[in-house]
Image (cartoon, grey):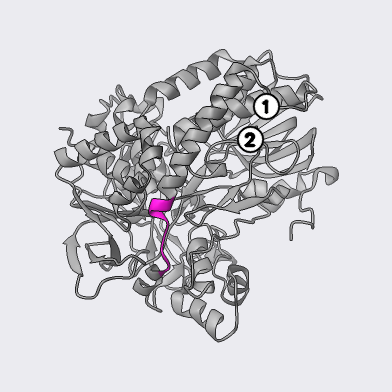
Amino acid sequence: MPSSASEPPASQPYDLAVIGAGPAGLAGAVTAAGLGLSVALLDASEHVGGQFYRHPAATLGAVRPEALHHDWAAFAGLRRGLEASGVSHLAGHHVWSVTGQDGDWAVHAVTGSDGGQERPVRVRARALLLATGASERQLPFPGWTLPGVVGAGGAQAMLKSGLVLPGRRVVVAGSGPLLLAVAGSLAAAGARVPAVVEASGYLRYARHPRVLATNPYKLVEAVVHGGALLRHRVRPLPRSAVVAAHGTDRVEAVTVARLDRDWRPVPGSRRRIACDALAVGHGLAPQIDLATALGCATRRTVDATAALVLGDGQETTVSGVWSAGETGGVGGSRLAIVEGELAALAIASRLDGQTELPQSRRAVRLRRGRDRMRAFADAMAAAHAPAPGWTQWLPDDTDVCRCEEVTAGRVREAVTDLGAGDARTVKLLTRAGMGWCQGRMCGAAVACLAARGGGPVPPPAERRPFAVPVTLGALAGLDADAAPGNPTDD
Amino acid sequence: MARTPAELVGAQPEPPFEITLDGRPVPALPGQTVAAALWSAGILAWRTTRVGGRPRGAFCGIGQCYDCLATINAVPNRRACLVPARPGDAITTQEGHGRAELSV
């Protein structure tokens, strides 16, 4: 475990605890250390980089890890910065709760590759930077629980870190710009990708010409993805969805249907595509459990996720808690890096006793970059926002909650017959969202069904008192004064 | 054009070792998770669900969905997509909650 000169004496808190070592957290930690703060960087993985810069372990001997990445140079720079800094990188730390108040935070973590070691760890810090990223949103369809149906981001993650594919002939489906990157990676790594099935239309980007013009690197990315897909003969199927996966013990084919503007399948448009895997996802959703448990306010994004409300200096609505990257609304790695850096400047300034935001040339430049990229992120989100008609491809006998095996029919019964009007009541009546994943996979779908499919798709609440599962042994190891679970968190 | 992920990144891995799934040998590379080693061998399911007894394997790939739970060296409910494979690991298809011995 690297530790260093900037580590505080044993009884002293760190100046800053950063949670998450993806682009935002790395940028924040390295910048803060450069400004003289003592910094602890906690991350669940053994390797820094987060999901975006996931990469193979050194023992896999990848000579060209950048072949699976965009902007690898930016990551290489951050990693060098981390190595040269005094940041204490606490790898394999799964943070399950944060307690305390402005100036005196306690970060609670369990350790090990999957958090299974019962060694509870508590890290104290004066300021907190939450850089917990995003996870993939899923909308269920018949057959989505079959082996071989995997998250699009999941397929990408397994490929980037383990150099493996879920199959040889992989359909990519869902919605969002990630799908193009996933299809490109899978094809480059040797999979045949017969189709990328996108529920929205790519032409919707054209509604925001000014935003595109001020973010030219995004156009370059689109051209790179488009070129890769052409080269690998991947067929784009816009305004379409996989409405069923077929097979008994694993997926053997999918049915694709065209969608209308409201994402309702168009009658008579169904066709079957043979495949041995399906990589599916409907955009990314901010991962904000730790923040909501602290009481940080959220806002509804244009694509129906809950994101943190952040001030001009990246501070949440809870004093002393900052956030950067996807937690404030999904916007990609470049935006995350800028926000991490900006948050570090704001935090250093606050710990130095300043009440105003820094007005240095660097801070002004970062804020300008952030605002420009945020505008682009909003345009992208608008183009891929799910429309309520998707529930028409969901028959009653399909499992919505993968953990507790709760069908759409039982959720609908709770809503129409028993009067449940929100996801929480549905959960209490049916157990949907009560299992191992705590509604991370079914939350978006249950929220839609509870809203009876009327109006825009509502975001799930993303409130979980425990951000990761914790054994009773780990809980018993806590000091009484550090115990979490402030009852003000509903 | 690359035909495999390893070829794409020019991987020169350290020598493979063996793990087992229900007694059947499966090769693994140092640095791969248990789930990655199983995918490499074309295995996509290593758990059956509690209610319907349906096969499941890795879904989210990043430790959030808990669909990839496996019994590893007699310890149930370990996330195969996070746990690194070690030489000689005995993976067992996990049935239900994986604690049949506690059932009454």
Left or right relative to A60: residue B62: right
- For the residue pair A17 and A146, the one nearer the viewer reads as A17
- For the residue pair A112 and A142, the one nearer the viewer reads as A142
Which quadrant: the C terminus of chain A? bottom right
Q: Chain of mark 1?
A: A
Residue B59 visible in this rendered orientation of the protein? no
Residue at screen point 64% across, 35% down: A312
Residue at screen point 45% across, 30% down: A334
Q: Position of residue A272 (x, y in %)?
A: 18, 66
* Real-space Cα separation, disc 2 to disc 1, in angstroms: 8 Å
SS type, badge 1: helix
Q: Which residue is mark 1?
A: A346
Residue at screen point 22% across, 30% down: B7
Q: Chain of mark 2?
A: A
**Magenta region includes residue A385:** yes
Q: Position of residue A8 (x, y in %)?
A: 75, 20
Which quadrant: the N terminus of chain A? top right
What range of the chain is rendered magenta?
A382-388
**Magenta region includes residue A368:** no
Quarter of image, res A2: top right
Please report contact status of discs 2 and 1: CB closer than 8 Å, yes or no.
Answer: yes
Quarter of image, res A106: top right
- For the residue pair A454 and A122, the one nearer the viewer reads as A454
Identify the mark at residue B94; answer none if there is no mark: none
Left or right relative to A260: residue A384: right
Q: Which residue is mark 2?
A: A314
Three-letter code for the amino acid on which mark 2 is drawn: Gln
SS type, badge 2: loop
Three-letter code for the amino acid on which mark 1 is drawn: Ala
